[in-house]
Image: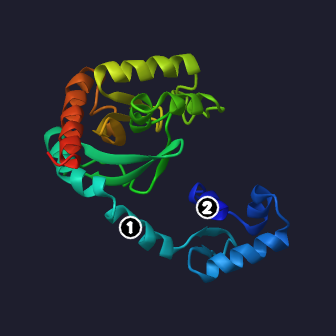
Amino acid sequence: MAVLDLLGDSADGLTGAEIARHLGVHPSTASRLLGTIAAGGLIERDRATQRFRIGARVVGLAAAAVDRLPVVSQARPQLEHLSAVTSETANLAIRDGLHVVYVDQVTPAQTVVMASWVGRRSPVHASSSGKVLVAFGEPALQEAVLGRALDPITARTIVSPTELRRVWAQTRRQGYATSSGELEDGLVTIAAPVIVDGRAVAAISVSGPAFRLPQRDVPRLGQAVINAARAASLRMAGR
């Protein structure tokens, strides 16, 4: 699991020596581990670079897991509607520890759209979906986020505990969160929570380049995202 986590967070893959160093084990131990995992098809090694990366079998397993998440099927109509009314990309994310994982996405017929984020992980303090899930989560979750060093993803990422507390409080008041250039330069996202039985189980967001999502449009888009999230919440509750 540690090997898969390492490779999942590495864009270019890792060598056996790098993996051994991260795991704190002898290179020969790492080599045996990597050989076993590779034999199962979960990882593969590039012959040219000798770097390991996630294998194709993981893609199939991940797709099967996503397909079986109830929130994906229940929220899909709202993602489609949100993308249609905003002419922007609509996303669905769930929380995995102190990260969010994007499990579905609907893109509009635009010339410029963001690349697929399905399967991508982002830290909760830098993304609008993460902010929403923390703001509407248990107080213990907020303390867990603030109890560790927060890495800036861009120059605009909020890492101040005081500022994050203010952002979470504002998110609860207005019903949605924003991220402007905090996760990617030039990217604006707006998210609202899908709430079932009083618990935020997912976040629906709309995203696009800053030139298409200026600050003056944020309240209107925020309401559209809230409407989509509320509709998904009702569907999840069977109403």
Q: Nearer the viewer, residue 105 or 187?
A: 105
Secondary structure of the residue carrying tag 2 is helix
Q: Quadrant of residue 191?
A: top left
Q: Nearer the viewer, residue 88 or 6?
A: 6
Which amino acid, by three-letter code, is at mark 2?
Answer: Leu
How far apart marks 1 and 2 lie (CA) works out to 18 Å
Residue 165 can be seen in this image: yes
Q: Residue at x 40, y 47 (%)?
A: 94
Q: Position of residue 8 (x, y in %)?
A: 57, 59
Q: Which residue is mark 2?
A: 7
Is 211 situated left or right of 185 in this image? left
Residue 12 can be seen in this image: no
Q: Nearer the viewer, residue 226 or 140?
A: 140
Q: Quadrant of residue 24?
A: bottom right
Q: How many marks?
A: 2
Q: Nearer the viewer, residue 182 or 2?
A: 2
Q: Earlier in the sequence, mark 1 or mark 2?
A: 2
Label number found at residue 63 = 1
